[in-house]
Every structure is written in structure tokens, then in C-alpha cells.
Image (tube, helix red, strand yellow):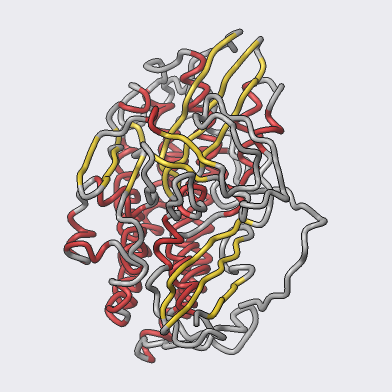
Amino acid sequence: MATKVVVDPITRIEGHLSIECDVDGGKVIDARTTGTLFRGWELILQGHDPRDAQDYVQRICSVCPVTHGAAAAFALDDAFGLTGQIPENGRIVRNLILGANLLHSHILHFYHLAALDYVTAPNLPPLVPQYAGDYRLPAAVNAAAVQHYLQALEIRKLAHTMLAVWGGRIPGQRGIVPGGSPANVDTEKIVQSKFLLAQVTDFIDNVYIPDVLAVAGAYKDWAAIGVGCKNLMTYGGFPMDNNGWNGKRFYSNGVYINGQAGALDPTQIGEDVQYSWYKDGIPKGPYQSVITPEPYKAAGYTWLKSPRYDGNVVEVGPLAKLWINNNATLKSILPGEAAFSVIGRHAARAVDCSNVAHAMADWLMQLTPGGPTCVPNEVPQHAEGMGINDAERGALGHWIVIDNWKIQIYNAIVPTTWNASPRDDNGQPGPMEQALVGTPVADVNNPIELVRVVRSFDPCLACAIHLITPDRKVRKFRVY
């Protein structure tokens, strides 16, 4: 008979997520992921001046506010008819801001969110309590990893300082707006950024990547655990020209469905709500969908919707981005389909971090001091726009419909909505639910294996859901 294992909440993630797994014979045979708070940003934005969007949406999440602001600005570029007009300096500054946040976020995830699933921590707050588990790193490697945990705090600060050079501040950066960036480009900023970037890059290449490789070597079996759906999607990232979502990008967009690579078609994106706490019957498309909460819906078990691509369950994130872009480094670390795993997600994130850091050094040298960074623009009376880009956790899209100079409809489909989605209208479990199935669980009272799988996705429920429903039953839980 199966044993039901509930972990509520999952800690060391952003936001509030619980999982419910049926374990039989020492393995998960079924899983459900539950986002326990209500997302309200789309409704909040209705009736606002469209130019409010890039500021408001940065409050969705404190880890990736930059990427939300950028997706909103990209959507407004599209709606305002600015595609092709962004000055080169503006495009590059946007990429530098996005890149700095990516470096910060990936380092944060490995060291301060996920590492304690593999590293034995000192018996000191805030590192305790910690799950009992099969910690395997050699003593010297483990001790070094603990020191790197502390060093990573300083490196994150350097990445945020670099972001503030161009964005003015963080959180709530002001460097990405419709039409480009208001930042002034001068030699002093370029030199300062190069100095900061060099230190961050050195840490990534000589500390972060070796630590990930050490974990991969010690936990080789985890390269076959947490496989998931093996369907992938990426919006790509870091525009290299001004031709909109389908122009040249540092990372190209695309899909990988049933073992076949294909071109991205955003019109194939839709959201199901059969198992979500929203009223049924809403349009699926992000230009039409307007949610109505239904917290006591009998079939519902989460506040997340079920995004699907042409009806397919797809995983998003650094693994999807690097796999679709045929990254040789990732495939050399984990040949074949071993990348579809817990270790594969961590390795992809580290490789992504190094790739972007080195690219940023080139982008800094492409800036023209004193050159224009932004073009003037006006709000149209009627328009719609789409802004898609890969955030740190994967495919992030913002869609806006403008009517009478105001926001009529606004929708954000975020990476964790894809990855932690519930079953869809066809009963297909979401990527994280599928990845949990088959996971070995040595002790149902100490399910460290389950949180290893979940944290490999770097979930962000703050991005996916927001406002608490105070009359819901409060459950008991243990905190790790």
C-alpha cells in the first residue's frame, strides 16, 4: 500500500510550494505540486497606464525582478511599434543588466538554496536543521564548499553592484524601459563593470563550476533521477539585434518535443485551468485570458495554471536553453540523455552562468560612450504586445492588450508556472510532477530525495502566485 508523503512548505525556494507524493516500494509512483498562494498581478494591472507595467511587475519577485521588468519592456516595445528602433547602446545595456542578474541568481541558487542538499553543514544557525541524508562529498571538498557558501555571498554583492551601475539600483532597477535604457554610457561605467565582472567570472570558473562537478562526481546516480517529461522549450535570451522576439539572440529560441527539435511558435502557447483554483471556461491564449479565482473548486489543487505548448508538457530553464542550443560543454559533462536529471539541471545552470559572464566582457567593449540609449515613444490608443525572454529559471512571457490608452488585459506566464504546473485538461502531469515520479525515497519520514528533485528546478512561487487566502486550512509542517 502506498504511503502519502507531504512536504509543506518546501523551503530554500522563493515562495510557497508544497508537494504530495505517493511512495510505494521505496519509489514515488504519483506526485502533485501545489502552489499555496493566489497570483493577482494580472488583475492589479488592469486599468493602469501601460508604462506602469515595467515598474509594477518587478514586485512580482525579489530574486528575478529584472527579468520581469525586461519582459514588460519588451512587450511594450512590441505594442508601441518600437521593434527595430532600439539604439545599440540601449540593447547592450539591457543585456548587461539582465546578465548581471543571471549571474547573481544562479550563484544564489546553487550555494544558498540547493547546496545544503549535498553538503554537510556545520551545526550552526542558519544552516540547521538539515535533513539527514546520504551526504557523500569527501571531507576536504565538503569543508571547501562550506567556505564557498560564505564567499558566494560576497560574489552576489559584486554582481548586484554591477547591475546597479547600469540599472541605478536593485531591486527595482530603472535601466530597462520601453525604447531602450535611460542609462548614460561612459568610460567610467565600462571600466567599473569590467573590474566587477572579472571577479565574478573568476569565482564562476574556478569555484562554482568545480563545486558542481564535485557534486556530479559524488552523486552520479542522480544523473538518472528526476528525468521528467524530456520535452523542452526556450524563448532564448540576450537579443543580438533589434528584430524582436525572433531575431538573433545569444541563445536562440526553440522547442524540443518527443525527441525532435523545432522552431518556436508563440501562438501555440495556452493555459489550462481544470485542476487550478480558477473558474473553468476562460480563453487559453495569453492575449485573451482573464482569471476568476475559485478557491473551493472541487477538482483544483493549486493556484498555478497549466501552460502547455501545442498541448505538450514542456520543461523550461537553463537545461532546456542549453540543450536546444546544442551546448557542447553541457553534453561533455553529461553525455546523451543524462542531462535530463537533477544533476543535469545544476550543471546546465553553472555552464549558463559561465557562458553569460564571458559574453558580457565582449558586450562591454561594444558600447559607444556618449551614444544614444533610448528612443522617444508614446502610448497607442489600441495595441497589443508580447515580450518573451528566458529568465534565470526559464521561459518568461508577458502579454499586454491596450485599449483607450490603458491596460485592458495583462498576462505573465512565468517559468515556475510551466515547471510546477498541475495536470492539464488532458490529465497530463506537469514537468515537476513527472520528474518526482520514480524518485527513490529511503525514509518517508526524512524525504531529502524529494526536495533534491524540486530544488533542481529552482522554483519561484513568488513569480507564480501571490496573495494569501486567510480562511484556508493551515497545515502542520516541519521546516528544513
Question: Which image quadrant for residue 250?
Answer: top left
Regarding residue 364, the answer to whether it shows in the image is no
Q: Is residue 271 left or right of residue 123?
A: left
Q: Is residue 173 above or below residue 53?
A: below
Q: Residue at x 40, y 59 (%)?
A: 199
Q: Can you name the residue that lies furthest to the right here?
A: 471
Q: Is residue 230 left or right of residue 158?
A: left
Q: Residue at x 51, y 14 (%)?
A: 80
Q: Is residue 94 left or right of residue 402?
A: left
- 118 or 352: which is nearer to us? 118
The x and y percentages for residue 26 are 42, 84
The x and y percentages for residue 445 are 57, 86
* Position of the C terminus by quadrant: bottom right
Q: Residue at x 62, y 84 (%)?
A: 129
Number of on-image labels? 0
Q: Is residue 270 left or right of residue 227?
A: right
Q: Can you name the residue that lies furthest to the bottom here?
A: 139
The x and y percentages for residue 159 are 48, 53
- 267 or 188: which is nearer to us? 267
The x and y percentages for residue 99 are 42, 45
- 270 or 75: which is nearer to us? 270
